[in-house]
Image: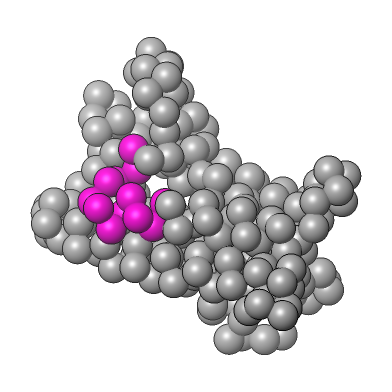
Amino acid sequence: MDIQLYLKFFFGLCALVNPIGILPVYIGMTDDQDPAQRQRTNFIANVSVAIILIVSLLMGNTILHFLDISIHSFKIAGGGLVIFIAMGMINGKLGEHKQTKQELTESIVRQNIAVVPLALPLLAGPGAISSMIVWGTRYQDRWSVLGFIIAIVIFCSCCWLLFKSAPLIIKLLRQTGINVVTRIMGLLLMAMGVEMVISGLRAVFPAWV
């Protein structure tokens, strides 16, 4: 098992999802819940994220074949989407780029916000799902897939611990600290998106790139 590959996958997922940037959104959406309800929301949200990402990882290749889409074309489209999300993070947008106004309005009247909008689309957004499909299509052997699944479970466990400590972390970092972390994550994420686009273009136009 290639540990370096799984570390790259894990930290790429951290940059793509940016759970620290979602912390203020999570606090705002759960401020009317008691501690027990907040922890239940936290648990359900991260279990849902794990399920969404693992299904995308396992089923991505099948979906692409069914729709007759090449992985290279998907890399270009997915990389462009990742770059778009990264631009929003660098500009200091903490999650609103993943959620439409209609979704935000609907979430206000729903009692259970763990799955929608926290898990989908705020945490497991289009960028994260696209990235899982690219990874799952590129590495299809059982050991790589197993390593990715373990990395996803570890990542979601870290998110659970992070959200569990959300009030303390926000108190320590304050909004300025969260903005700084979000911009750094956005810069790393943009580099990942550019790499995805270049990889796709190199395969589609080998004589040009």
71 shown above or below 97? below
Kindly tell me whether residue 101 is visible in this rendering. yes
Image point 20% across, 57% down: which residue? 178
> In front: 76, or 102?
76
Residue 37, placed above or below residue 175 = above
Residue 76 location (% of width, % of height) = 62, 60
Residue 107 coordinates in the image, percent (x, y): 40, 21
Residue 46 point in image, percent of width and height: 50, 46
The correct choice, above or below, for 134 with respect to 30 in the image is below
Residue 54 appears left or right of 195:
right
Magenta part of the chain: 85-96
Residue at point 59%, 55% (across, down): 78
Q: Check the image and report above or below for 165 versus 204.
A: above
Residue at (64, 46) in percent of width and height: 51
Looking at this view, is 38 or 46 the one in front?
46
From where the camera sits, is residue 36 visible? no
Tell me which corner region of the image, top left, top right, bottom left or bottom right, holds residue 58.
Answer: bottom right
Q: Is residue 209 magenta?
A: no
Q: Nearer the viewer, residue 118 or 90?
A: 90
Give yes or no for residue 89 being in the magenta stretch: yes
Query: In which quadrant of the rendered view does residue 169 lie?
Result: bottom left
